[in-house]
Image (cartoon, rainbow, N blue to C red):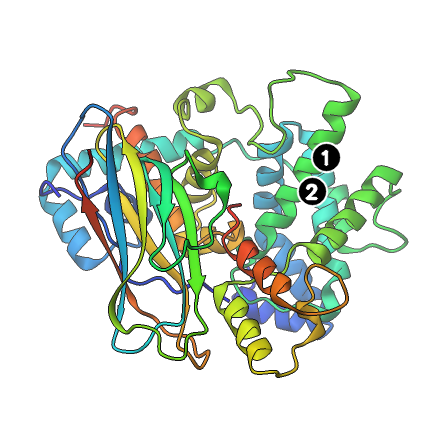
Amino acid sequence: MDPRTDAELARAWRGGEASAFDAIYARYHEWVVSLAFRYTGNREDALDVLQDTFAYLHRKRRNFELRSQMKTFLYPVVKHLAVSRARLARRQAPLDPKLDPAAPATAPEETAALLQGLSDVQQEVVLMRFVDGLDLQAIADALEVPLGTVKSRLHSALDLLRGRIPPNR
Amino acid sequence: MDGHLDPLGLDAVRAGDATPEQRAHAEQCAECRATIEGFRTLAARLTPARIEVPAEVSRRILRPKRSWRPLAAAAAALLIAVGIWFALRPRKVDIVDAYSVALRLQNGQSVDATWDLNGDGKVDARDVDEIARRSVALR
Amino acid sequence: MKAAMLALGLIALLPKQEPRFVSVEIYAQIDAPIAAWQIELDCDAKIVAVEGVKEPPYYDPAALQGGRIILAQFTTDPSPPAGRVLVARVHLMETGRTDYRANLMAAASPGGERISPRIDLVRLGGK
């Protein structure tokens, strides 16, 4: 595993080092495809989004400057690509017209039940925190909302969730 | 507060970015520890199964000899859409920008043409208004 | 520009009540004149109306009936107020336990330099 930080890898890659890009890919490709799946609900589309995401990153190499965590930078790119692809898929093969393509795709039944009652924005923040492992500032940066908004959404979401899982004794 | 950690504090302990005071409280409070454990269980249940990325896909991404892959028209359009989206998404502004432009206009100073947000060819009070409106727009 | 996050006004109320109308006064405090300010208010209540001091602040009409609003105003008056300044009053309908959070997003002195006043909230009982 490459020990360099995201910022160091970004700098090295921008400078032309191909192995730095390999390291970025190795570090994040599983998370990218998992995040893409959250919105597409479909493995094939998620893999396409993976390729599109790194193709996009590749095109930005010359001007690429990482001012935050890599996940913070990638999150809106992956989400936008995945939502666009999900919309395209729904136009071609309409499923449930109630589904909003911008909301996380219908999760496995258990996940949907766990997050029931949370608004779309609350669900998104919970998943970014619990599954993506982002800190609150990174979530704010990725969603381009103030930190206070993230705290508020997460606070109210966790308030709703705290009674749902029986604690392990 | 009722002597327990609030939800954000509980989550901070779960995530490992709690303050020393929050950690100390969690160590002493069985009820908070139980909730934190509940959050950990929830996080585990929300984490999806790993999606296997075929080696060929990774190879195409890492070593694009010709093109990435036979790009369908839709996929190419998506890439272009992302580029356009990033380039054209509304410029992030805040009220200090509106104030600064208003002040320069009031003082008869020149204002950068990029502040012509309404595209009418000049920067005036209507653009100040537009900057202020964009500052407070909810996402 | 990253929003500057300073003092959070957090007011927790007693549990479950009938719907009631309340007002929340938003204050910005700094030992310097405040020429421009932008504040986000986030809460569990429904925002019903917004009131300014000399004139109404800028806000997104979509915020009405929701729980989140961004308010902003500026003045080119060469001597704006300093100290603890009432900047806006928000009228809300509470339907139970309500937490309020206010964040400073941006502020400036008359010269245009960015400043960071502390933000306080005062909840006033409703009718």
Q: Mark 2 points at which residue?
A: A81
Mark seen at residue A85: 1
Q: Is residue B23 left or right of residue A45?
A: left
- Check the image and report above or below for A146 versus C83: above
Q: In which quarter of the image is residue B118?
A: bottom right
Pick the residue in front: C126 or A57.
Answer: C126
Q: Is residue A23 left or right of residue B74?
A: left
Mark seen at residue A64: none
The quadrant of the rendering that contains the C terminus of chain A is top left
- Is residue B40 at all visible to an observer of this figure? no
Graded by Cα atoms within 10 Å as few (under 14), some (14 to 19) or many (20 or more), the crowding at tag 1 reads: many
Q: In which quarter of the image is residue A152?
A: top left
User: Element type at marker 1?
Assistant: helix
Q: Which residue type carries mark 2?
A: Leu
Furthest residue toward front: C54
- Check the image and report above or below for A1 versus B48: below
- Check the image and report above or below for B59 versus C110: above
Chain under disc 1: A
> Label 1 near label 2: C-beta < 8 Å?
yes
- Is residue C2 at all visible to an observer of this figure? yes
Graded by Cα atoms within 10 Å as few (under 14), some (14 to 19) or many (20 or more), the crowding at tag 2 reads: many
- Check the image and report above or below for A41 versus B100: above
The quadrant of the rendering that contains the N terminus of chain A is bottom right
Labels 2, 1: one chain: yes
Q: Is residue C79 left or right of residue A32?
A: left
